[in-house]
Structures are given as C-alpha cells and as structure tokens.
Image (spheres, helix red, strand yellow):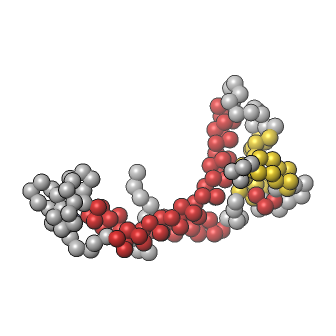
C-alpha cells in the first residue's frame, strides 16, 4: 500500500469541505439503514464512552441531513441469509466513520510529517561495511537508519 500523495490529500480535504459538517451517525432500525448528520437527530442519549446509545430521527429534516439510506430485508446484523445486508450495514458505518475520523487523521498526518521534518537530519547517512549508519549511530540494517527513512517519507512532499 502506497502513501497518499499531497495531491490526493488535497482532493480529500476539498471533498470533506464540500460535505455537510460532521459528526455523522449510522442508524440501523427495522430494515432501514441510514447515515444522519448527528445534529439532526433528537433525544440523543450517550453511554459512558460518549457513544450514542439512543436517538430519535426527526420528522422533518433537510436533504443534507439524511446522507445515505438503504432498505434491507433483515432487521438485525448476522441474520440468516443477510450477508449482503450486513455488507450494506458495514458500508453505512464506514461512511459515518470516514466522515468523523478523516479530518483528525489528516491533521495527524500533518503533525507527524512536521515532526519528522524537524527530527530528520538532512545530512546523508554514512554506512559502514555492516550497513550500519555511522553518521547517526544506527547499528541495524533492518530497519535502516531512521534518518534515511524519514527523508524518504518526506520526499515528493509539496506541503
Ligand atoms: Zn543515517
């Protein structure tokens, strides 16, 4: 799996900016799988971890608040012959999870790259006959010197 390019990350940021603001919440009730903008739900109760434990769907809402809907034959995950329905449940959960987590992951990538850029020594590695880096005091060949890996990670970066 290759790392996303700066262009791909920019496209993803632009897509997230165009979408209704998160968090989103996937619901699964009596054969209706939906993804809602969380702020549209009413009577929300949460468990000790802050996860939504109960909710009501609104009787009136904007099209931009009900983001995905799919009717399925089974009412509960894992019901017999419900494999395709469970796939649709997973897709709805992925849609909500992606909307909720991608902004944080993008920010984390930015923070990690900034940190790597600041930590990485721009001076080239100097390997001895064992393949150890004398310049950075790295005495392994696998993984290679972290400064070499850091320079590779930052290569091609435009932001
Ligand atoms: Zn090195």
| x then y, percent, for residue 27 | 75, 46
| x then y, percent, for residue 38 | 76, 58
The quadrant of the rendering that contains the C terminus is bottom left
Q: Is residue 118 visible?
A: yes
Give whichever of 123, 41 is nearer the camera: 123
On screen, 2 above or below 31? below
Q: Quadrant of residue 14?
A: bottom right
On screen, 74 above or below 9? above
Q: Residue furthest top?
A: 80
| x then y, percent, for residue 147 | 28, 65
On screen, 130 above or below 153? above
Q: Is 114 displayed left or right of 143 in the figure?
A: right
Q: Residue furthest right?
A: 59
Q: Is 148 displayed left or right of 23 in the figure?
A: left
On screen, 157 above or below 68? below
| x then y, percent, for residue 108 | 51, 64
Q: Is 129 displayed left or right of 101 in the figure?
A: left
- Residue at 47% over, 69% down: 111
- Residue at 69% over, 51% down: 49
- Residue at 64% over, 38% down: 87
Q: Quadrant of residue 2?
A: bottom left
């Amino acid at each position: 799996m290759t790392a996303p390019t700066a262009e791909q990350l920019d496209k993803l940021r632009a897509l997230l900016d165009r979408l209704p603001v998160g968090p989103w919440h996937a619901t699964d009730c009596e054969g209706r799988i939906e993804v809602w903008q969380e702020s549209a739900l009413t009577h929300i109760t949460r468990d000790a971890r802050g996860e939504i434990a109960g909710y009501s769907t609104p009787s009136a809402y904007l099209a931009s608040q009900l983001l995905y809907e799919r009717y399925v034959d089974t009412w509960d995950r894992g019901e017999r012959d419900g494999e395709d329905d469970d796939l649709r449940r997973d897709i709805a959960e992925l849609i909500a999870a992606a909307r909720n987590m991608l902004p944080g992951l993008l920010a984390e990538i930015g923070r990690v790259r900034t940190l790597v850029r600041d930590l990485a020594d721009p001076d080239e590695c100097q390997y001895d006959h064992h393949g150890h880096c004398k310049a950075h005091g790295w005495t392994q060949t696998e993984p290679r010197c972290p400064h070499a890996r850091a320079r590779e990670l930052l290569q091609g970066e435009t932001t």
